[in-house]
Amino acid sequence: HLATSLPLPPERDHLRPRIDLVAFMIDIKSKYSLKNVEASLAYVDDSFFLGKVCFLVTGVGRVNYCSIEMNAIRNLGEVYCSPVLFCELEVEGSQVATAQRLLRMLEICAGHVPGVSALSFSSLMRNCADD
Amino acid sequence: ENADPQRTAFLLRKQWTLYSVTPLYRFSNAHLRDYARLLSSFIAAEKQKGLAVEVGVELDIKVSVSSLPYLKGSDQDQAAILVQLSSRSPASPKNSEEKLIWSGWFCCVSGDDLSKNVPEDFTCLPLFLVNGAECYTSIVGSWFQKTFDCSFRRLAISPLILSWMAAMWTGCKVDKTASAMELVFSVPCLPQPLDISYAIHPEDAKALWDTVQKTPGEIIQEEVDVFMDCLYSHFHRHFRIHLSATKLVKVSTAIASAHCDGIIKFLQSQYLTGVLMLLTELAISQIE
C-alpha cells in the first residue's frame, strides 16, 4: 500500500489488512520529502518502532543533487531506532535489490520466518548506537 | 590577509568554471617562464595537428604563466598560479595590442587539510578556475596532466552547499547598495523544464539571517536550515509551491554568485579570499 503522507484516510480503516512494516521514503534531492516523513512519523503508533519501521533513502548515487544533509538522516534512524536503507531507485539493479531486501524484512515482520522476529531489527540498531 | 583590490580587480565580474585538481608532481615556482614556453609549443603543435582552436581564425597565441602570491589563506598555502593565453592576429601590425582570450588560475586558500598529508614532491593547488573557450581549456588541461601527472575534474556544487553560500553571503556586510539576493530553482519531473527565480530584497534577507544566526562569525547547519525554511514558507504562503521539493541550482548575492554546474562569479574583492576558502574546501573534498 502506498501513501503520500500519514495519517491514512480513516474511511478505509475497516477494509485495511494488518500493517506489518512501514517504510518511509526519503528522496535525497527533496528537502520536502524529509519534512513530510518527519511530520508523518507523529502518526505512527509507538509499537511500530520495535522493528516495524524503516527508512528508505533514494537518490544517493548522485551526491551533487544532495539537498538533505546526511547527519539529519542518521539522526532520524537513531532517534526512531529504525534501520536506514540507502538505494538508488532510478537504477533498475538497485530497484530490484532494494525490493528483495524489503520483502525479506516484511517476511520477518509478518512472522513468516520462524525464530526471527521484528524485534531483532531494533536490537541490532541499539547495538550499533551503543558502539 | 585581504588581497589588494586593485590587483584582484581582473578576477571580479567574470564567469569562472570550477575544477578540482589533484596535487601536481614536481611543479616549481622557479620555472614559470619555462612552463609558459613549453605550453606555447604544445599549443602550436596541437594547432598543427588541426586539433586546436576556433574555426577559420589563424591566431598567434602567446602564453604567460605567473604567480599571484597575494592569493592565499595561510603561509602554508601555495601561491596561486595564473595562466593566460593572448592572441594577436598575424595580419595586424607587430605592436598592436594583444587580446586576452583565455585565463585559468590554480589556487589553494587554507588547504592545510590536503597539503599536510601530501609527500614532498607534490604541490597542492586543488582549485582551478577557467574563463574562456573550452577548446583551450582542454589543451591547457592536457598539458598540465601530462607534465605534472595530475587530473582535473569539473567541480559541481550541490543544493546543500548552495544553501550554505546563500546564508553565508547574506550575512556579509556590503558598503554600497547591495543587489537583490536571487535563488533559482529547477522543478523536476515536468515534461518541459521550468525554472523558478526567487528574488529577495538584500536588507530583508540580511535582517532574516541576523535573527537566525546565534554566534557572529560562526554558522551551523541548523541555522542554514531555518533560514532557508523561512524563505520557503514565505514563498509557499504566496504561491502554494513547495520550493523544498525542487532543486536549488543558482544563488546570487552581492558578494558572489554560484551555479550548481560549478560556475562562480566574484563580485566583491573584499570577500574574494573567503569565497576561495570555501571553494578550496569543496575541491579538496571532491579529490579525497
Image (spheres, rainbow, N blue to C red):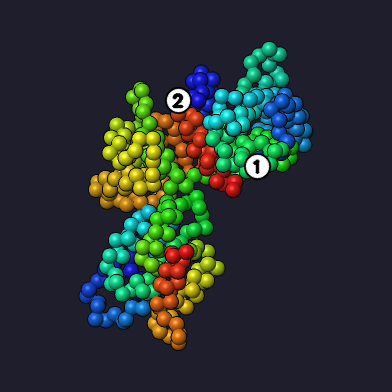
Quarter of image, res B97: top right
Q: CA distance from mark 2 to mark 1?
A: 31 Å
Element under label 1?
loop
Which chain is disc 2 placed on? B
Residue found 31% across the figure and 65% down from its top = A41
B117 in relation to B69, above or below: below
Q: Nearer the viewer, mark 2 or mark 1?
A: 1
Could you tell me the amino acid type at mark 2?
A: Gln
Image coordinates of residue B103 in percent, x first then y, are 60, 29
Nearer-the-camera pick, B257 or B217:
B217
Q: Quadrant of residue B113?
A: top right
Q: Which mark is residue A71?
A: none
The percent coordinates of residue A52 (x first, y second) are 37, 74
Residue B179 drawn above or below residue B185:
above
**Label 2 vs 1, first from the N-terminus:** 1
Residue named by callout 2: B270
B239 sits left or right of A74 in the view? left
Q: Is residue A101 above or below residue B155?
A: below
Residue under label 1: B118
Is residue B63 or residue B5 the one in the foreground? B5
Same chain assignment for discs 2 and 1: yes
Q: Nearer the viewer, residue B157 or B63?
A: B157
Image x and y of residue A100, in percent: 50, 75
Residue lying farthest front?
A: A130
Helix, strand or loop at label 2? It is helix
- Position in image of residue A38 (x %, y %): 32, 60
Q: Report in which chain the residue with disc 1 lies.
A: B
User: Which residue sits at x=45%, y=82%?
Assistant: A116
Among the 4 quarters of the image, the one containing residue B216: top left
The residue drawn where x is 37% and y is 26% is B174
Is any part of residue B135 visible from this angle? no
